[in-house]
């Protein structure tokens, strides 16, 4: 009798539990090894776990963290399926799945192809982005029905591809709806991540999943846009473009003078020219307010009274006050040669006038 009793007892499972030592296992089917579960067996569900009982392919009961003694009171759905009477204890065969409900962290995402966006300043541009996210199972029964089904082992790899696709699609919608300019994206990574969470989580709820965190690590613009931004930044840093142009010219001359492949005398001449240009630039920069002296105005004719020069167009001599009239031709009293206005001696014969 003891032999048959021990044999029957050995075919029954009295303790059901699951210890997970992996980092990416989401669902693990309890190994029955051909045995049946004894009514009154102990079920232990640890924190961040959920136990799902499936009877003949139909989802029965779901147990949250805690310690349970399997009975008709603790298994209402299974009791209804089996039509057990009150107080009747009998072994039963059922599949038990343990679902990991902890957060799966540091999952990477990235745009395989550039994402199109419309920017107010640059127009239509393409961007690339990457970052990380974390997710968890919030509805084990729904997750079983929609995702893992009857797989004996299900890992993060089974849903990671689908989540990445939803993330990238949601990121495109989030950037378009947020209307954040391309130049301000780097300063709004946190706000953008929160916006993506609100956009993507409704799409994951039908699978029994939810995003716990979403991090945007980098958003890169096309190379052409980055070059344009660099040029604009350089212009802002340089400030005075005239001085920058002079500096560039001086640098080009200096490099030409230091070119070892050129003629030494020519290099020396270029170097001297560069030195002269740089000296002039330095002088001008040290005296920016110095202006060139105005050209001297041409003097007018000599006064017919005192002989002093009179400014052109003046009606009176500024020295003696004599009225000025149109100059009349004068001739030497000795030789008759024509004299210049105000001349005191004849340039031909030297006679005093």
Image (cartoon, rainbow, N blue to C red):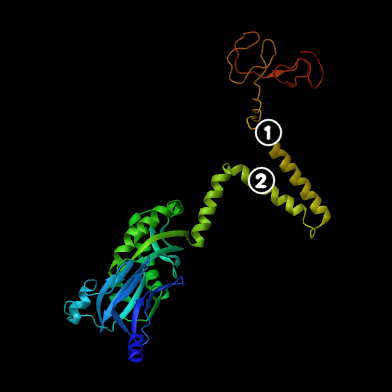
| Kind of element beneath mark 1 | helix
108 to 276, vertically: above or below: below
Depth check: give the residue in front, 134 or 130: 134
Q: In the rendering, at what x and y percent does residue 305 appear?
A: 67, 10
Q: Which residue is mark 1?
A: 286
Residue located at (83% from left, 55% from top): 264
Question: Quadrant location of residue 11?
Answer: bottom left
Question: Quadrant location of residue 72?
Answer: bottom left
| Kind of element beneath mark 2 | helix
Question: Quadrant location of residue 246?
Answer: top right
Residue located at (35% from left, 59% from top): 197
140 to 153, vertically: above or below: above
Q: In the rendering, at what x and y percent does residue 147 appear?
A: 32, 76
- Determine crowd level at label 2: few under 14, some 14-19, many 20+ residues with C-alpha closer than 10 A: some
Depth check: give the residue in front, 85 or 48: 85
- Left-right relation of 100 to 350: left
The reply to whether residue 305 is in sight is: yes
Depth check: give the residue in front, 116 or 320: 116
> Of all residues shown, which one is farthest toward the front?
1
Please give the label number shown on residue 247. Answer: 2
């Amino acid at each position: 009798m003891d032999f048959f009793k021990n044999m029957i007892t050995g075919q029954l499972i009295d303790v059901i539990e699951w210890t997970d030592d992996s980092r990416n296992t989401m669902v693990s089917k309890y190994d029955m090894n051909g045995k049946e579960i004894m009514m009154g067996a102990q079920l232990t569900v640890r924190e961040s776990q959920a136990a799902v009982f499936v009877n003949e392919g139909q989802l029965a009961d779901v147990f949250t963290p805690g310690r349970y003694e399997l009975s008709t009171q603790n298994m209402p759905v299974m009791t209804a399926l089996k039509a057990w009477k009150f107080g009747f204890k009998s072994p039963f065969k059922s599949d038990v799945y343990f679902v990991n409900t902890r957060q799966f962290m540091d999952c990477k995402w990235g745009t395989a192809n550039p994402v199109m966006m419309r920017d107010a300043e640059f127009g239509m541009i393409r961007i690339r982005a990457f970052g990380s996210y974390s997710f968890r199972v919030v509805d084990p029964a729904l997750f079983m029905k929609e995702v893992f089904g009857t797989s004996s082992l299900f890992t993060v790899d089974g849903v990671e591809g689908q989540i990445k696709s939803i993330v990238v699609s949601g990121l495109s919608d989030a950037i378009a709806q947020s209307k954040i300019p391309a130049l301000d994206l780097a300063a709004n990574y946190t706000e953008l991540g929160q916006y993506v969470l609100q956009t993507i989580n409704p799409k994951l709820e039908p699978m029994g999943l939810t995003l716990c965190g979403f991090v945007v690590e980098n958003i890169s613009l096309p190379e052409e846009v980055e070059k344009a931004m660099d040029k604009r930044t350089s212009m802002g840093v340089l400030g005075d473009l005239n001085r920058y142009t002079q500096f560039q010219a001086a640098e080009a001359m200096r490099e030409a003078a230091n070119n070892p492949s050129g003629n030494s005398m020519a290099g020396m001449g270029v170097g001297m020219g560069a030195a002269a240009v740089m000296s002039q630039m330095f002088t001008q920069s040290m005296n920016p307010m110095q202006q060139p002296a105005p050209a001297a105005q041409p003097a007018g004719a000599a006064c017919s009274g005192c002989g002093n020069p009179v400014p052109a167009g003046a009606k009176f001599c500024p020295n003696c006050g004599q009225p000025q009239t149109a100059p009349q031709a004068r001739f030497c009293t000795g030789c008759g040669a024509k004299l210049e206005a105000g001349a005191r001696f004849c340039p031909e014969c030297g006679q005093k006038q």
